[in-house]
Image: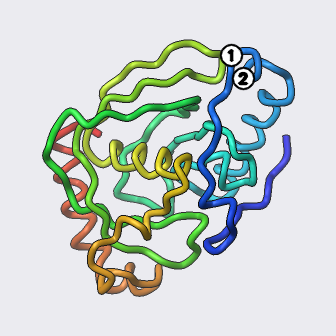
Amino acid sequence: MAIRKIAVVGHPILRTVARRLTREELLSEPIQRFIDDLVETMRDANGAGLAAIQVYEPVQICAIEVKDNPRYPYKPNVPLTVLVNPEITPISAETFENFEGCLSVPDLRGVVDRVTEIRVRAWDRHANEIDQVVRGLTAGTYQHEVDHLHGKLFLDRVRDTTTLCTWKEFERHHQASFAERARALVARFGS
């Protein structure tokens, strides 16, 4: 396993639409090794998720995991989940304001509207079918990572640019109120 370099905003790879994988490609040794690298890189950076495109591989793979993450103390734990060729369908019209950051947009956060309930269809890393409903704050994490696979950053979804702030200013002025709203969302949906 290896820790890979993470692309930052401005690099053209982040605006690329990732290509879908065949089952044969997914099960190949190089892709399986890549998935190990992706997970190791995400964990090393204390990310809640990481998309392949963020480490310069334009394929439809992303990893999500939250385990008492110090960057996101208000997020519920999510077991390691690898999504391959994911498709997200909103199953609710309800949205919530999510104060997002990104490993590819260092030291910047902003408010993004995310759907509270989604259906996720994908393969796991072994090409087994995933078909699940994801709710609450965790649904926001899934939407953020899948956006990367379509060449989108959270910055594209910030409708009020006055919400943009550095991590330090987020912690100083916004984290307490956002964490309170996030905990209420987690209590409501269990995730």
Q: Do the residues labelled 2 and 1 touch (CB within 8 Å)?
A: yes
Q: Residue at x 30, y 27 (%)?
A: 133
Tell whether 9 sits left or right of 73: right
159, above or below 37, in the image: below
Query: Dot 2: what SS?
Result: helix
The color scheme shown is rainbow
Q: Which amino acid does label 1 sit on?
A: Arg
Q: Which amino acid does label 2 sit on?
A: Leu
For the N terminus, the quadrant is top right
Quadrant of the image occupied by residue 135: top left
Q: Residue at x 20, y 63 (%)?
A: 180
- Label number found at residue 50: none
Q: Which residue is drawn at 72% across and 51% down?
A: 41
| 7 to 30, vertically: above or below | below
Residue 45: image quadrant is bottom right
Query: Which residue carries the number 1 mark?
Result: 23
How far from the left and from the top, in percent, is residue 95?
18, 52
From the viewer's side, name the closer residue of 123 and 63: 123
The percent coordinates of residue 155 (x first, y second) are 43, 70
* Side of 16 relative to 167 (left or right): right
Q: Residue at x 74, y 47 (%)?
A: 57
Element type at mark 1: helix
Q: Residue 26 carries which label?
A: 2
Q: Which of 118 and 181 is in front in this view?
A: 118
Instruction: Residue 149: give x, y in percent of width and height.
Output: 56, 46
Residue 91 horizontal side relative to residue 85, left or right: left
Crowd band around label 2 with a 10 angstrom C-alpha radius: few (<14), some (14–19), many (20+): many
- On the image, the x and y values in percent for residue 61 come to 62, 37
